[in-house]
C-alpha cells in the first residue's frame, strides 16, 4: 500500500517496536509507564492490548519504517538513524516521505560518525575527497557528502563496517558510535558527526482520522508526561565563584543554578537539567571549572 492511499479503517492502534535489540526493553518500559499492558501471542510477535486498544508488533528495527509506510502499523519506536536513512533512500529514489518522527524519547542516544585510522590528522570534511567510505547508512552518507560538496565513493556494507580499513576496502568508515570502544579496538577514531540519533516515536505522514486519532492523541499526551519526568536530571558540582557565570551559560537550558554553602571561594551548586547529559557536555563543564560532577535521575509519581 502506498502512503497516498487511504489508511485502513481500524479502531485499535498498532505500534511496532524491536523484538530484540538495545531499544526493545526501554520501548516496552516507556509504553508500560504510559499505562499500557498486553497479552503476548504464542509466537511472541504480537501483543494484544488489554488496558487500552493499543497493540504491539515485535519486529526488526529496520522493518519498522516500512511497516508504517505500508499502513501495517500506525506508530513505531525506532532509532532516528534508521528512520532518516530510509526516508533519505526514498527521496533519493524520487518517492515522497511516508513517515515522520513525532517525538524524541530520550533513550538510545548514539551518533552516526565518520571515523578514520588513529594515525590520521583530521582537518575537516574536505579530507574525505576522493576516498572510499564504508557504511551501513549509504543514503544518509550520500546526503551528507552532497551537503559538504565532497566527492567520495560510498561502499555499502551490511555489517562489520569497522574492519573495512584493515581489509583495504575503504579508507574511512561511517558508522554508529556510542561509547567508541569498537572503534578503538579497530584502531579507529571518530572525527565528524553526520547525525545525532536517539529513539523516536515515528508515525505516518498522513495521520489516521478514524477512532485511532483519539487514541493517538491520548498516547502522545501520556508520552510527553512520562518522557519529561524520566528525562530530568539533577546536576550537582563544585566551582569557584569566578567560574559560575561561564558555567551558567553552558547550562542555559537548565533551571537557574542554586548556590549552597561551600568552603572559601568554592561553592556547592546544583540545577535541574531538562535532558540527558552527554559525556561531551560533562567534559565542557569540567573545562569551564566544574568539579566533582554528579548526575542523579529524578523520579516522580505519575498523576
Image (cartoon, grey):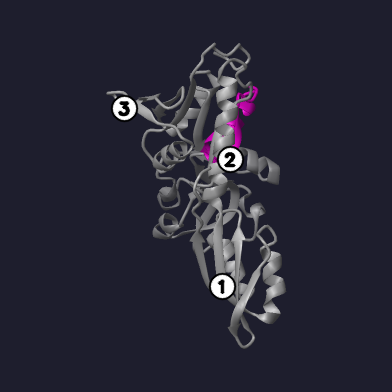
In terms of secondary structure, where does tag 2 sit?
helix
Question: What are the residue bounds of the magenta stretch?
Answer: 79-104
Identity of the residue drawn at 54% across and 11% down: 9
In terms of secondary structure, where does tag 1 sit?
strand
Q: Earlier in the sequence, mark 1 or mark 2?
A: 2
Q: Earlier in the sequence, mark 3 or mark 1?
A: 3
User: Does the magenta run of residues contain 95?
Assistant: yes
Task: Pick the residue in front: 250 or 197.
Answer: 250
Q: Which mark is residue 237?
A: 1
Q: Which residue is mark 3?
A: 44
The answer to whether mark 3 and mark 1 are in CB contact below 8 A is no
Marks 3 and 1 sit apart, C-alpha to C-alpha, by 46 Å
Q: Tell me: residue 18, above or below residue 255.
A: above
Q: Quadrant of residue 181?
A: bottom left
Q: Which residue is mark 2?
A: 224
From where the camera sits, is residue 111 visible? no
Residue 225 picture location, percent across and down: 57, 42
Q: Residues within 10 Å of mark 2 (few under 14, many from 20)?
A: some
Identity of the residue drawn at 64% across and 27% down: 91
* In the image, farthest residue toward the front: 303
User: Does the magenta run of residues contain 119?
Assistant: no
In terms of secondary structure, where does tag 3 sit?
loop
Q: Quadrant of residue 274?
A: bottom right
The answer to whether mark 2 and mark 3 are in CB contact below 8 A is no
Amino acid at each position: 500500500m502506498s502512503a497516498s492511499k487511504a489508511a485502513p479503517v481500524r479502531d485499535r492502534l498498532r505500534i511496532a517496536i524491536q523484538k530484540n535489540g538495545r531499544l526493545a526493553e526501554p520501548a516496552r518500559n516507556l509504553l508500560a509507564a504510559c499505562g499500557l499492558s498486553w497479552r503476548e501471542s504464542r509466537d511472541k510477535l504480537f501483543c494484544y492490548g488489554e488496558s487500552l486498544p493499543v497493540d504491539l508488533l515485535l519486529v526488526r528495527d529496520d522493518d519498522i519504517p516500512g511497516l508504517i509506510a505500508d499502513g501495517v502499523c500506525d506508530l513505531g519506536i525506532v532509532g532516528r538513524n534508521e528512520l532518516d536513512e530510509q526516508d533519505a533512500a526514498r527521496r533519493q529514489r524520487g518517492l515522497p516521505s511516508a513517515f515522520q518522527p513525532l517525538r524524541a524519547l530520550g533513550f538510545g542516544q548514539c551518533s552516526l560518525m565518520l571515523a578514520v585510522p588513529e594515525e590520521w590528522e583530521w582537518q575537516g570534511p574536505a579530507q574525505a575527497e576522493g576516498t572510499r567510505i564504508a557504511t551501513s547508512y549509504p543514503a544518509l552518507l550520500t546526503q551528507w557528502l552532497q551537503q559538504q560538496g565532497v566527492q567520495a565513493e560510498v561502499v555499502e556494507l551490511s555489517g562489520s563496517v569497522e574492519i573495512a580499513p584493515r581489509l583495504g576496502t575503504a579508507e574511512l568508515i561511517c558508522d554508529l558510535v556510542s561509547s567508541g570502544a569498537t572503534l578503538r579496538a579497530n584502531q579507529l577514531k571518530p572525527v565528524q558527526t553526520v547525525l545525532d540519533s536517539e529513539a523516536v516515536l515515528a508515525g505516518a505522514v498522513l495521520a489516521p482520522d478514524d477512532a485511532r486519532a483519539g487514541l493517538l492523541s491520548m498516547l502522545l499526551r501520556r508520552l510527553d508526561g512520562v518522557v519529561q519526568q524520566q528525562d530530568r536530571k539533577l546536576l550537582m558540582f563544585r566551582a569557584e565563584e569566578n567560574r559560575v557565570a561561564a558555567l551558567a551559560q553552558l547550562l542555559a537550558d537548565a533551571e537557574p543554578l542554586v548556590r549552597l554553602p561551600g568552603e572559601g571561594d568554592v561553592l556547592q551548586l546544583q540545577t535541574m537539567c531538562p535532558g540527558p547529559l552527554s559525556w561531551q557536555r560533562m567534559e565542557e563543564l569540567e573545562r569551564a571549572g566544574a568539579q566533582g560532577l554528579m548526575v542523579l535521575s529524578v523520579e516522580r509519581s505519575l498523576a
